[in-house]
Image (cartoon, rainbow, N blue to C red):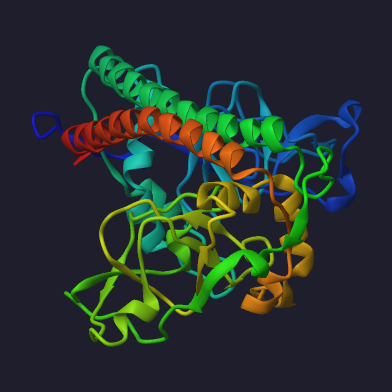
Amino acid sequence: MEKYKTVRLGDVCEIVMGTSPEGKTISQNSSAGIEFHQGKTCFGNLYLNESGMFTNSPIRFADAGNVIMSVRAPVGDSNITPRKIAIGRGLCTFNTKNNFEKLFLYYYLNSQIDFLRLQSTGSTFKAVNKDVISDLQIPLPPLQEQKQIAAILDKCTELIAKNKLMLEKYDTLIKSRFIEMFGDPVQNPMGWEKTELGNMCKEVRYGTSKPAIENGKYTYLRMNNITFEGELDLANTKTIDISDEELPKCSVQKGDILFNRTNSIELCGKTCLYKLDETMVIAGYIIRVRVNEKLNPQYVSTFFNTKSIKKLLKEMAKGAVNQANINAQEMQSIQIPVPPITLQNEYDSFVQQIDKSKFAVQKSLEKAETLYKSLMQEYFG
């Protein structure tokens, strides 16, 4: 937006830094005063959710319709509050003038998140101060054009949200269909024969402990590449070189089940099914599982992603909070129902059809996200 002059943000709006009242004045009693927000805990996609906390001694306010921003870790996230609230030291708000569209300001602040995080300081909690925020340079087109820009970005973010919601619905459908066909895997209401997973495995192996390198021959899958929901996420991968002799021991092929054995207690046991044709290599924190002909790999992967099994995995995980572990022997000791393979295969076919729909939605999502980034660059640099 080089055709419009940039102005110092602090010169075109009043920046109000939050101040926290005494803890004894804050409660869940809605009749005790005004709704209070300490930080970004209750941020929604765009609009602020209710906190359920109130104070009778508010010090700083954000008016209804105002943009609010997190100024303590994580720094830079923004929301719009639909109602007047009291804000604590983790937030700031912006009192704008009549020639300022608040949605335009919201999107501008989103474009500055990376910069604000680089400017944040503090050894325990990173924070950004008022001077840094005030000195931000914002392009300021006429009000009508600000509204047009905000409307365009709104449509783009709505499309992104719609696609993400559709993907969530497909994932829910996959898991709910599993329960419909097989029942809860812990309660086993359909009375399937149960056995230890290890009795159904052809092979169980850990990945390699070798470090990643630049421009390696193979994509290197680490624990962050398995999502909590049970998907393979290739957005942030590294590479590795492995000898031909070692490759069969730590590479993955279509149909392999990948189990994250070491992570935080909440994430330990993340599991996904490898569905690609490309040969990739797994790190040591991942266990590669190959099952025999009595189990369908998709059935096993969804089994590990049901609520009841995730609860079981959390109970099994042991160690420090940030370094819990479930080893291969413990994983293989888990009891798994074994329905007829024909029924498992029927479920697999259902998931494959859903995957085709998910693929189309994922492409639409990626296209919308690319457009959004391009527009943000065009409008705000």
Is residue 95 visible in the rendered image? The answer is no
Against 327, is 145 above or below? Answer: above
**Residue drawn at 34 percent across, 18 percent down:** 155
Instruction: Report x, y in % for residue 121.
Output: 47, 68
Q: Residue at x 58, y 29 (%)?
A: 173
Q: Nearer the viewer, residue 45 or 75?
A: 45
Q: Quadrant of the N terminus?
A: top left
Q: Which of the pair 319/43 is nearer the observer?
A: 319
Quarter of the image where one finds residue 33: top right
Up/down of 134 relative to 160, above or below: below
Q: Position of residue 258 (x, y in %)?
A: 49, 63
**Between 48 and 228, the one nearer to me in the picture:** 228
Horizontal relation, residue 129 to residue 140: left or right: right
The single residue placed furthest to the left in the displayed view is 3
Extreme-top residue of the structure: 144
Q: Residue at x 55, y 27 (%)?
A: 47
Q: Is residue 219 visible?
A: yes
Find residue 46 and report its horizontal and vertical position in percent. Answer: 50, 29
Q: Is residue 18 above or below residue 151?
A: below
Front residue of 7/36: it is: 36
Q: Is residue 60 left or right of residue 224?
A: right
x then y, percent, for residue 32: 90, 31
**What number of labels is visible?**
0
Q: Quadrant of the C terminus?
A: top left
Question: In screen coordinates, is 4 left or right of 131?
Answer: left
